[in-house]
Image: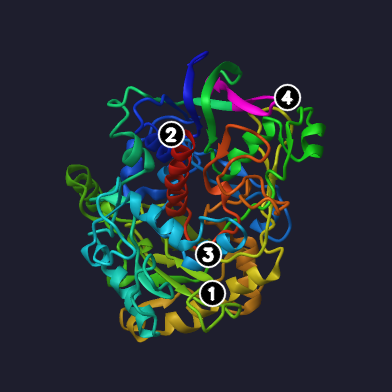
Amino acid sequence: VDGERHDFIVVGGGSAGCVVASRLSEINDWKVLLLEAGGEEPPQADVPAFIPLNWETRFDWQYQTEPEDGYCGGKSCTWNAGKVLGGGSILNGMIYNRGNARCYDKWKELGNDGWGFEDVLPYFKKSENNRDPSRAANTNYHAVGGLLNVQRFSYQDKNVQLLMDAFQELGYKDVDINGGTQTGTTLLQFTQKDGRRMSTNRAFIAPFRNKRKNLKVVTNVRVTKVLIEPNSKTAYGVEYASERHRHVTGKAYVNKEVIVSSGALKSPHVLMLSGIGPRSTLSSAGIDVIMDLPVGKNLQDHVTCVGPQLKVEGKQQTLSSNQNIIRHFREYVRNHKGPFSAPGSLQVSAYIKSRYADPAIDFPDIQYFLPSQAVFNTSTGQIRLNTPFCEYNRIYFQPSVMLEKSIGYITIRNKDPFLQPVIVPNYFKNIEDLNVIIDACNFVAKNLSNTKVLKDAGVYLDTRPLPDCAHLEFGTDDYWACLGRNYTETLHHFSGTCKMGPDSDPEAVLDPQLRVRGVKHLRVVDASIIPTLGNSNTNAPVIMIAEKASDMIKEAWQ
């Protein structure tokens, strides 16, 4: 693509970039170039039971946070992020969760006109093809006919309904969390089709890649900076490097706009390398300042940890013999059915409220995710195996802080585009976040694990303390706080680092049209634009953001 000229260049083929490139290339006269640093979508990503299989591989940026006391045991936390066509929608748990309407109304209250829930709901529905009749029937919230398949898994092992029943025994109703009510338990919907992952690549790029002559997709190419004319402050192209050679190998040019869709960790990195960011940071790195903006500030995430665990033994465990595992996998390869066609207990979730949530309104701040594991006791301790999600004898609760108060930042180390950025999440800097973890753990240990439905099934709380917290009494607030600080995990919901906001907001990098302030022909479209992270998973909101941005761009240039 060296020297080529296109109408639009989209930097990053992830959850947002694939949508934007697809939608803009619907205009036959517009030439669209999509550049992705990673490779093509791998076939193993299809398998729902293999969700973590692509983490810490070549399909993952494998970011490391700076070691800090107070979380991740004082060591670096690993932050997985998609480096592959499809981006985060290849590495994630496929969960389709939009979040509470109040989250988007807050964006509007902050001065982002056009971003309230009633404004964004049509863009959620635009991409949605909901294949669960009971959900799709609620046309106020759901749609059919979009490019993105959304449905529950047809295969459910014996513990899925059991867990739902346990929450319901405590009064938490079965709700559609993407409908009008959020507090309760739910059988999650996923971006999947008939037991196979549906990434944004598979939904938005693959059907058109060989049909649209005006859409060009290039993988294994890393954009090292956006080219900006310093006097007029106008973006006119990008500089890029082949991932294999790791030095600048070419430039491509635009007639209309450069759209940076590299995610909340890579987009601020690209902007800073391009001369857009805090003046002091850029100057000390020897980068000419094009625009002094607070790029990389406002880093938000949903923090969680390895929480209470349920022992799922005897008739409730799903561990199979090697022979049966092979048989189940063959069944999946043959027709995408059976245990491998679903992610085990991860299908169940629930939203509840901590001590800080308003009891009078439906705006919960705790969500439980329920991944599974195989654990074996030995004379020297426990061995934990990363088995497929369908093979397990433990279910561990990830007590997740969904309205996190702590704010971090990301910045560059120097002007080398191949060095990983500096990431400081500041988990638990606001102590309320740790207290929410404590409330969430207590609910499982004291309430949920004591339900009749779980006891009757022989499913019990595992009261064996985890090694780094064994000096504390199991089940106390101090013990749960220790889990939060030492067994910290991320939900990979990184956002906010190129915040949108009105002219009056000194923290805003973008205007509500997602244009970079003070720079012409440059937008950012991904999770980094989010001003305040809501209580959702981020994949569905990012796809919505990309759908809305695509219409904004079309309106600007047609």
Which span of residues is magenta-colored? Answer: 224-244
Three-letter residue code for mark 3: Asp
Decide if residue 410 is on the left or right side of residue 40: right
Q: Of callouts 1 and 3, which one flags the residue occurring earlier in the amino acid sequence? A: 3
Which residue is identified by label 4? 231
Instruction: Kindly report the distance in space between the C-alpha atoms of the residues bearing marks 1 and 3.
Output: 26 Å
At a point 50% along the width and 41% down the height, the residue shown is 56
Which residue is identified by label 1? 440
Q: Quadrant of residue 207?
A: top left
13, 484: nearer the viewer: 13
At a point 20% along the width and 52% down the height, the residue shown is 337
Q: Position of residue 35 (x, y in %)?
A: 48, 28
Which residue is identified by label 3? 105
27, 292: nearer the viewer: 27
Decide if residue 365 is on the left or right side of residue 344: right
Three-letter residue code for mark 4: Asn
Mark 2 vs mark 1, foreground winner is 2
The residue carrying pointer 3 sits among few (fewer than 14), some (14 to 19) or many (20 or more) residues within 10 Å by Cα, namely some
Mark 4 vs mark 3, foreground winner is 4
Three-letter residue code for mark 2: Gln
The residue carrying pointer 4 sits among few (fewer than 14), some (14 to 19) or many (20 or more) residues within 10 Å by Cα, namely few
